[in-house]
Image (spheres, grey):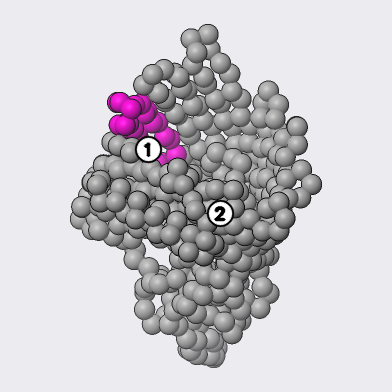
Amino acid sequence: MPIMKRSISFFSLLSVFILNSAHGQSYLLDDMSSKGEIAIESRVFDNDNNPNTEDFGVAFFSRVEARYQNDEFSHVFRGMARVDRKDQNRNFVTVEDAYFSTRLIGGGSVTLLAGYKIFNWTATEAFHPADQVNSRNFDGELENLEKKGELTIEMEVPFWQGIFSVFLMPRFEEPKLPPATSRLGPGIDLERAVVVKDEDAISNQHWVPQFGLLTRQNFSFGDISLHVLRHINRNSPLYGTHDFDTVSVPVVIFPVPIFRDIIVPFSTRLVPYYFETTQVGGTFELMLPVVTKIEWAYRTFNKKTGILDLSKAPVNPLDGFSADAIQKPQDHGEIAIGFEYPFDHDSGSETYLFLEFNTFLGLDKLERQAQSVFQRDVFFGIRHGLNDFMGREIFLSTIVDLENSSERLFNVSYSQRLSDQWRIKTGIRVYQGKAEEGQVPQGLELLNRADSFNLTLTRYF
């Protein structure tokens, strides 16, 4: 912990020195602040009798934040790290926010920002169709995944009842997918991610221009945001091998044999392919006794995108070969509708009820399943806070697949303070979903019996 504090202080002092040198001004140390947390995280999964997976994990987690702000300039640094003693493939280190910003033009009405940033474009609790800017760490809670910061240059100006911003992202940050040892993944290791812009631009180099526009408006009745995003779709990759070819083989069709093309993979290591997409979407929050939330997005893909069109191959690929990545991604929409009802109790405690529904539009059932674990689901949750000195809180939730009622996710968690600096959180997660005989597991079926008990002890400083 002393090392963390010295690191924060060093970063803050260095930033102040740079600002002083650049502008010849004197800044007060009172404009700086820092905070952080360290934690021990443990999770135990239901034994799957598979020696290749890790059913028990103990990880050390830390997050530090340093912030400096005055009337003209500000900077933020926030990063996190997780080291698991049992499963090193779960180790995760990332920069969340690390940017400088300054106010431009008279009165400081225009803000220019440069660096790594986490965007928060969601309004709902469990389903997030609009919040697609940041890459995620998929080895975690599916409805609340950790985000990686994105390298960004952003300019923000006041507009009407809110703001308008334009931003450029020059780099694709690769999501962290669960390794073969993880109980929260498909049980296989994947190759390095490949970015697909079009048929002539397929690369594992991640420097690729992306941009977006956003406006957020605040009214007395609620909040509205709209955005246009041209980027590499980070959260719905397609999978296939990077080394395949088409060959002609004889197929006997009585009375004579003829030759037809089939696709032959040279290896079984799968590659996640991420495709360029244009996304138009937004959020809407209506502040009533029952808070109503709508979050939506529509995604269109480059019509030239696609490594190979399977419709040209009259014979299916070899058994056991995943050909998803060599198909063209489908344009589609996604929408989530949610309701939140808070009410107070005479004891001073508060309860929040959540009800949400999501679905994909323009896709059939199999195509929806390929897009997301939550493709047509309903979420119900209860959060009850006692509002006492110990900050005790309990949260219960369930997610049910409306197209396959056997797919369910249950979650129960409890947290409270132990002192001003220590907090404990514990919970149980239960996954249900079993594929029909002869069918490839999809969605929560991949996580069947990945039930877990979690315990986290955190110290804040």
Query: Which of the pair 333/26 is nearer the observer?
Result: 26
Q: Nearer the viewer, residue 388 or 441?
A: 388
Tell me if residue 275 comes above or below residue 391 in the rendering: below
Residue 267 is covered by the magenta coloring: no
Quarter of the image where one finds residue 153:
bottom right
Q: Which residues are magenta?
A: 409-438
Residue in the foreground of this view, choosing between 433 and 319: 433
* Image height of 429 relative to 212, above or below: above
Which quadrant of the rendered structure holds the C terminus? top left
x 30%, y 37%: residue: 459
> Which residue carries the number 2 mark?
73
Q: Is residue 198 left or right of residue 459?
A: right
Q: Is residue 71 visible?
A: yes
- Mark positioned earlier in the residue sequence (1 or 2): 2
* Residue for point 59% across, 85% down: 200
Give the number of the disc on residue 345: none
Numbered marks: total: 2
Q: Which residue is mark 1?
A: 429
| Foreground label between 1 and 2 | 2
Q: Is residue 231 in view?
A: no
Q: Position of residue 279 (x, y in %)?
A: 67, 60
Q: Gap in Å between the C-alphas at discs 1 and 2?
A: 44 Å
Magenta span: predominant SS is strand
Q: Is residue 416 covered in magenta?
A: yes
Question: What is the x, y in percent for residue 216?
Answer: 70, 47
Q: Tell me which amino acid carries mark 2.
A: Phe
